[in-house]
Amino acid sequence: MCGIVGYIGEREIKNRLVDGLRELEYRGYDSAGIAVMQNGRIDSFKAVGKLSNLEEKTKEYSTEGLGVGIGHTRWATHGKPTELNAHPHMGEYSYVVHNGIIENYREIKEKLESEGVTFLSQTDTEVIVHLFEAEAEKEEDLFKAFKATIEQLDGAYAVLLVTQKAPDTIFFARKGSPMILGRNRKGEIFFASSDAPLIGEADEVAYMEDGTVGYVTPKSLYTEPQELLFVPLAGDKMTAQKGGYRFFMEKEIYEQYDVMSDTMIGRVLDNDIYFEEIDEKFLEGVSRIKLCACGTSYHAALTSSYLFERISKIPVNVEIASEFRYKDPLLTDDTLFIVISQSGETADTLEALKMAKDAGLKTLAICNVDNSSIVRLADTTLLTRAGIEKGVASTKAFATQVMVLWMLSLFFAKQRKSMDESAIKEEIRFMHYVPKVLQKSLEVHEKCKRLSKRYLHGHGFFFIGRDIFFPLALEGALKLKEISYLHAEGYPAGEMKHGPIALADAELFTIALMPKTLLYDKTKSNVEELSARDSTILSISPDLFDLADDFILTHPHNHPMLEFFEMMVVEQLLAMEIAIRLGNDVDMPRNLAKSVTVE
Ligand code: M6R
């Protein structure tokens, strides 16, 4: 995914920008570029591929003295990864870098073209710089011109713009795509789209709110609609990387809003799902899907099996990779083999993928790490774009896996005409609400913190749910056991009376996922059965349930997937708070590794 950096100061500017971009490399990109402004002149360089190509191109270039620079790593969404499409994009006398997507860029582009503007790239970003210059023709105050530009943009953006008309100035705006401004005692100013490039450089940082627009020079900083709130940035890399959170897991839970927007950018359009990685013929000859993964990724696979069958009307089966490898599986060439992995290095999943490839199956990877072994091996990959995940307990990776799979089920539904267009549009309409559902909910977090003290003992936890809430129950139980070391199991709510209910007593904690939009009454009867056996019940639901001992109220939603994502966050926070109370190292639980590269 794209990355942005910016710098104002007296040190060599090119190196500051390239070093900053290197810190963002983990997000994946396919081209990079910088623009440096000094003494009223702008020099810009771009290169396709790795940052080393940009370094090679700029090896003879360096600066001395005060100057301004902006830089970008681009992950192609509109237009191919070419030099022309790489950022910064230029107008007559200004340059811009942008993360996000400008949804109404076509209309803006047509209007500007009709006024005689020539476009060089296929990107949505280029409209920003031309629009700014058009506004600057009408308005002498360049901040007003910039603001007028931003007001005309629909979509998500983090934008930095420099112009020869305002030497020493960077204009900036943020909506729906993260942007941080940092500064230090030497008077240097930094921008970055995530905190990694700022660590060790800035003393304090401001995480911009959506809707922020402003400008900065070496001597002044102006923002609307409110001033930026600066907080200290810890000098030590580890603390700083946690961004004020106690654990990486907590940070990653809270990041889910931003990364989910990244996952969707360029893929979830107003009325359509678009995957440039998959062509129209992809499903030719495919009549079934086999999904294969381990751990949390397996739970994402299981969730999607409901979606693929219900939405895309394709028969699906899901396999745990370590089981699949040795069962002498019967593989038929009408099967699309999908592997899911956060790390892309999980040995069992990788081996399963090799088996599928050897059998001549079409393969697709859903993965968070570009260039990982699984990505390199699969025919096609959809990156989940969750950013680096450090907590051993997977959180944002799971959220983005499920999202990509939901998107894929709709994408296939369209190709197979298994759902009518209006129903697909309706699903997409709900999909747009997901980032909002994931937005931090301090109240819910507080409630989980308070409740956690009641769940530190007992002889076990049952997480129960039906339909897609069954894999979510499995995931809740896995999260809890991984970091709290308490015994927890996930069950389909309807299975309890086939055996597990024998364990029910007051010391058995049932975490009941009770969504209103899916099989509420059925789940309710299963919970009633447990309550009648005196099990202690914590219900997670938008409705109060009078037989529950405790409850966490979620928001009412009109779509099961929205309830799914909100309950997912509750499970993550609850597991984390219980583990913290038990004094465990949440990020590095005993006996576990982040990447399981042995079988
Ligand atoms: O990197 P992968 O997604 O392939 O990893 C699979 C599992 O090892 C992983 O999901 C594991 O279960 C996590 N610790 C869950 O939080």
Image (cartoon, rainbow, N blue to C red):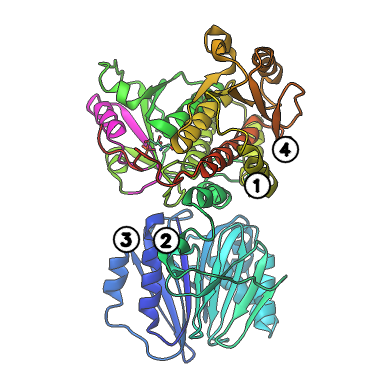
The secondary structure type at the circle numbered 1 is helix
Q: Which amino acid does label 2 sit on?
A: Met
Foreground mark, 2 or 4? Answer: 2
Q: Which amino acid does label 1 sit on?
A: Lys
Q: Where is residue 252 in the image (x, y as percent from the top left)?
A: 51, 49
Foreground mark, 2 or 3? Answer: 2
Image-quadrant location for residue 307? top right
Query: Along the horizontal axis of the image, is 114 left or right of 278?
Result: right
Q: Which residue is drawn at 61% across and 78% down?
A: 215
- The residue carrying mark 1 is 436
**Which quadrant would the C terminus be assigned to in this image?**
top left
349 within the magenta span: yes
Q: What residue type is labelled 3?
A: Gly
Marks 4 and 3 sit apart, C-alpha to C-alpha, by: 44 Å
Q: What stretch is highlighted in magenta?
A: 343-370
- The residue carrying mark 4 is 555
